[in-house]
Amino acid sequence: MNMDNIEAFLYAFQLGSFNKAAEALYLTQPSITARIQSLERELEGPLFHRDGKQIALTERGKQFLPYAQKILHAYQEISSTLREQPLTEKSLTIGCTLLMSTHILPEILPIYRKKYPGVNIRILVGSSAYIMDKVLKKEADFGLVRTVSHPLIESFHLHTDTLHLVVPPQHPFRDIPRSKLTWDMVGKEPHIVLAHGTIEWFMVQRHYHRNQINPHIMMEVDNFEAAKKMVMRGVGISFLPELCIAEELANHLLFHISPQPAAQLTRKIDIICLRDGNRDLVEFFIHAVKALDRKTLMSKTI
């Protein structure tokens, strides 16, 4: 039921004339007539007796009058309350890993801010387990994490990330043909890996174990950005996520090598929320990622 039509009906009743209602609402008389006729069609009967310029409520109009007054009053009350609400009370809390905060959120949030400019956004950064805990405690509206599992959590696939082996541009491996570069040669190079016990650490260890290689691990760090900086400075080589290294590869600050057989090191990135959480919000972010041109988001992948 259209609020403008209800408002036209009430003004016409209170002022006793379609012309006066039009003047009060800064509309033309035909516009008022059209709105009331639309309402009459919806209610399947006339609301006014028309006698020249004089109007009077029909029985149907009298029955509808108190409901129309309540509807308009409720609408005005809701509108007033929402207008008076400070913008700082409209907030969104997103939990995410460091990689997500650095390489995915900067692409998505401008789209969200354009549609919802008055929302105050808070970002919580931590491990996937930490973010899941924040979502469970309702301290975050949703999270961007590696795949996690919990009976109260609902997960939606957002992106599949791949770890690639990278070296600094001046590294001699650049000049070795792929067919001649072996994992045995790579394993002897000093490796910079994510801290012991992380899923990425286990992925790299499992890969070398399958190839019967004991890699030379000379440094462990707690985040990929630190590992990337170390590789760029020539400290060692490392497996790094595609989202993390795209700009450096494009600017020739890092070089991707592919010993054979190719490593298959992938991990899923999910968006998580409570099962009774705001699904519309989650859907917005999922569609925002999918709507991005691959050259703006996924060009940051290899």
Image: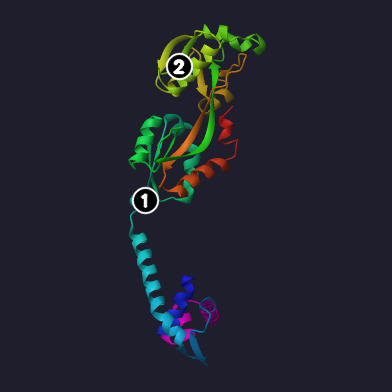
What residue is rendered at 47% in x and 49% in y? 280
Instruction: For the residues labelled 2 and 1, say whether their Cβ atoms are less than 8 Å apart.
Output: no
Q: Position of residue 72 (x, y in %)?
A: 40, 72
Amino acid type assigned to the residue bearing label 1 in the image: Lys
Up/down of 294 relative to 180, above or below: below
What residue is rendered at 35% in x and 37% in y? 134
Mostly what secondary structure, the magenta segment?
Answer: helix
Q: How many residues crowd mark 1 within 10 Å: few (<14), some (14–19), many (20+)? A: few
Q: Quadrant of the C terminus?
A: top right
Seen from the viewer's position, the closer of residues 96 and 32 is 96
What residue is shown with label 2?
193
Render colour scheme: rainbow
Say left or right for 23 vs 297.
left
Seen from the viewer's position, the closer of residues 136 and 296 is 136
Q: Is residue 25 visible?
A: no
Q: Secondary structure at mark 2?
A: strand
What residue is shown with label 1?
90
Q: Position of residue 105 (x, y in %)?
A: 47, 37
Farthest-out residue, front? 151
Q: Is residue 21 magenta?
A: yes
Up/down of 149 relative to 283, above or below: above
- Could you give the CA–CA distance between mark 2 and mark 1, rounded to whole angstroms? 40 Å
What residue is rendered at 51% in x and 42% in y? 286
Q: How many numbered markers are drawn?
A: 2
Seen from the viewer's position, the closer of residues 73 and 229 is 73
Q: Secondary structure at mark 1?
A: loop
